[in-house]
Amino acid sequence: MAALRLWLFAAALAEAGSAPETWPVIGVSNGGPWGPWTWQEMCPKETYATGVSLKVEPYQGQTKDDTALNGIRLYCTHGSHGEKSEAETVESQSNVWGQWTDPLWCPQGSYLTGFSLRVEQVQRGIQDYMGATNVRFICSDGKILEGHGLPWGEYGPWSPFCKKGLCGIQTKQESIRGVLIDDSALNDVRFLCCRQ
């Protein structure tokens, strides 16, 4: 069945005379190791990311399982010509724990261009591993937006910068593992750069 779907997709592309669009991608070197990369989700055409919100599970205490960062949502607008109230959201896959924080916005006329990820060092044995715990972004005017994640772990180096801003997202998520097994939720993220 999967082979048939792939063949139909390839045939549709051949008929249309086009190949799938590719976008420049930025990432960081300190992401967590668990889970597969999920799907890419792109801002609508002619918009780019000017705001961001995180899905965060609060600290659960020493005897409960913590997952910290569970999702990242980009707010896509037409920049200085668009209103925040008209923003479209994109988020790739998010996990089930936590709540969405209020969005953080770049100053009027600027947009998100790069990021740095805070990740807890891998814990072995019966230790509770959280994966990614927070993320910060830099706007095109130099302003830094730091999410309302958890304080555990260390920030890694800044990603390369997208000259024309961020237009898409792809997360690396560990699936729910079940009762009495350590969950880590979001382990890594990469962003797709706008091309125009």
Image (cartoon, grey):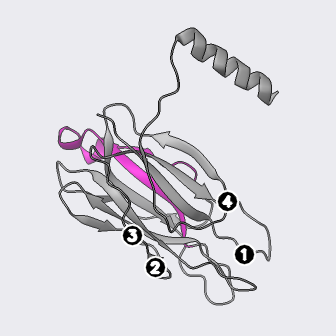
The residue positioned 61% from the left and 48% from the top of the image is 38
Q: Nearer the viewer, mark 1 or mark 2?
A: 2
- Give the numbered dot on residue 35: 4
Q: CA distance from mark 4 to mark 1?
A: 13 Å
Q: Amino acid at mark 3?
A: Pro
Q: Which label's residue is closer to the chain start, 2 or 4?
A: 4
The residue positioned 48% from the left and 53% from the top of the image is 190
- Give the numbered dot on residue 85: none
Q: Which residue is mark 1?
A: 182
Q: Which label's residue is closer to the chain start, 3 or 4?
A: 4
The residue positioned 58% from the left and 51% from the top of the image is 93
Taking the view exactly as shown, the residue that stands out farthest to the right is 1
Q: CA distance from mark 1 to mark 2?
A: 20 Å
Q: Which residue is mark 3?
A: 157
Q: Amino acid at mark 4?
A: Gly
User: 144 or 97, which is in the foreground?
Assistant: 144
Q: Which residue is mark 2?
A: 154
Q: CA distance from mark 3 to mark 2?
A: 10 Å
Question: Where in the figure is residue 105, as x and y percent of width and height?
Answer: 27, 57
Q: Amino acid at mark 1?
A: Asp
Q: Which residues are magenta?
A: 68-94
- Give SS at disc 3: loop
